[in-house]
């Protein structure tokens, strides 16, 4: 009986040793910090601002014109002829529709441009994470945003940040 228990303990110890030998080296990075703090992100924001500012200004101008026409209608409604009032109401409705369509197009184009730019930034972040992991012999890198807790000694964020600069 004792011999089988001893053999069982030896087998268990052998299994634990083989699991320990196969354990992967792990690392974590704060992806959000890397993306938001990167110079590429700041450059992307400035580029998008320059590219989309004329459209933004056009939307503001359209909004102001609509507000002016709506104000005129509210102020002068009682003194306007029925035809003038009807024409101004139609103009306001057309302006509202045009503004909504222009704004929707603007948002879609901006969203698409942001996604493309962030995709490029993410590719760069992944490349630098891979580079740091390879030099340290790390086999798996997790996003710290997905992990409840990890020891700070496996955090690679600052090293990757240096590579991104």
Image (cartoon, helix red, strand yellow):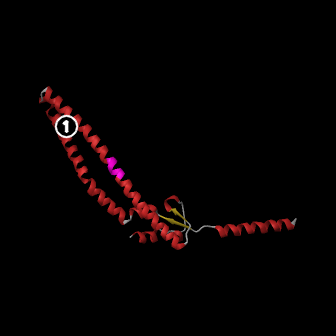
Mark 1 = which residue? 70
Q: Quadrant of residue 140?
A: bottom right
Q: Answer whether residue 33 is visible to the viewer in this image.
A: no
Which quadrant, please, contains the C terminus?
bottom left
From the top left corner, tell me how far across and down residue 64 is, in percent.
Answer: 20, 44
Q: Is residue 49 visible?
A: yes
> Is 123 rendered above or below residue 56?
below
Q: Name the quarter where the N terminus is drawn.
A: bottom right
Q: Nearer the viewer, residue 70 or 53?
A: 53
| Residue drawn at x 31%, y 45% as measured from the top left | 105
Compared with 114, 81 (above or below) is: above
**In the figure, is residue 142 to the left or right of 52?**
right
Q: Where residue 14 appears, x then y in whole percent?
A: 74, 69
Q: Which residues are magenta?
A: 107-112
Q: Classify residue 16 by image quadrant.
A: bottom right
Picture mark count? 1
Q: Secondary structure at mark 1?
A: helix
63 sits to left or right of 26? left
Q: Residue at x 44, y 64 (%)?
A: 125
Q: Residue 108 colored magenta?
A: yes
* Residue drawn at x 49%, y 59% as measured from the top left: 145
Q: Quadrant of residue 21?
A: bottom right
Query: Which residue occupies the foreground of this view, 70 or 108?
Result: 108
x and y percent of residue 146 in the render?
A: 51, 58
Using a 10 Å C-alpha cutoff, classify the residue at mark 1 as few (fewer than 14 neighbours), some (14 to 19) or many (20 or more).
some
Q: Residue furthest top?
A: 82
Left or right for 95, reference 145: left
Does the magenta-highlighted stretch encompass residue 29?
Answer: no
Q: Residue furthest right?
A: 1
Q: Is residue 20 above or below residue 97?
A: below
* Whole-percent x, y for residue 152 in the image: 52, 69
Please name the predominant secondary structure of the magenta segment in the image.
helix
């Amino acid at each position: 009986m004792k011999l089988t228990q001893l053999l069982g303990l030896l087998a268990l110890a052998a299994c634990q040793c083989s699991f320990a030998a196969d354990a992967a080296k792990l690392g974590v990075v704060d992806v959000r910090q890397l993306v938001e703090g990167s110079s590429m992100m700041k450059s992307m924001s400035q580029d998008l601002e320059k590219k989309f500012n004329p459209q933004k200004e056009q939307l503001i101008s359209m909004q102001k014109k609509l507000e002016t026409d709506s104000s005129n209608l509210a102020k002068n409604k009682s003194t306007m002829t029925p035809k003038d009032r009807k024409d101004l109401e139609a103009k306001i409705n057309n302006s509202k529709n045009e503004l909504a369509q222009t704004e929707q197009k603007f948002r879609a184009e901006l969203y698409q441009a942001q996604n493309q730019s962030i995709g490029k930034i993410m590719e760069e972040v992944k490349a630098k994470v891979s580079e740091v992991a390879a030099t340290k012999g790390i086999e798996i890198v997790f996003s710290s945003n997905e992990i409840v807790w990890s020891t700070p000694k496996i955090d690679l964020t600052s090293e990757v940040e240096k590579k991104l600069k």
